[in-house]
Amino acid sequence: MLTTISLSAANTRRPGAATILQEGPAGNDASVVARVGEALTHGYTAAFLAETGMLLIAAIVGIAAVTTRRTQGAAAASAVA
């Protein structure tokens, strides 16, 4: 999934970035390789930020699930007593 995010973000900056990067050194065009490298770096950064967001959401859901179980258990114990 992160590869998809990375390549999509890179392709918005420079369409065909991965292909151009493979062909760039053969054409001895350093400026194209540099621009494509910047586009791919942007893609990797976007993927990293997306993963960070997903991790934070998972942590919030996990904390909420643990808190809910404790609250439910306390309510059941007081109802029995």
Image (spheres, rainbow, N blue to C red):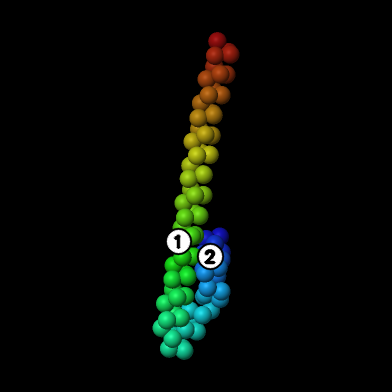
Residue 15: % across, % down? 56, 74
Mark 2 neighbour class, 10 Å CA radius: few under 14, some 14 to 19, many 20 or more: many
Mark 1 neighbour class, 10 Å CA radius: few under 14, some 14 to 19, many 20 or more: some
Residue 53: % across, % down? 49, 49
Closer-to-camera residue (63/44): 44
In the picture, the quarter occupied by the N terminus is bottom right
**Residue type at tag 2:** Ala
Count up the numbered dots. 2
**Residue type at tag 1:** Thr
Closer-to-camera residue (66/18): 18
Location of residue 45 (image quadrant): bottom left
- Say which residue label 2 marks: 9
Label 2 SS: helix
Residue 37 against residue 24 in the figure, above or below: above
| Residue 3 in view | no
- Residue at 46% across, 81% down: 32
- Say which residue label 1 marks: 45
Q: Distance of mark 1 from mark 2, alpha carbons?
A: 9 Å
Are dots 1 and 2 in contact, CB under 8 Å?
Answer: yes
- Residue at 46% across, 89% down: 27
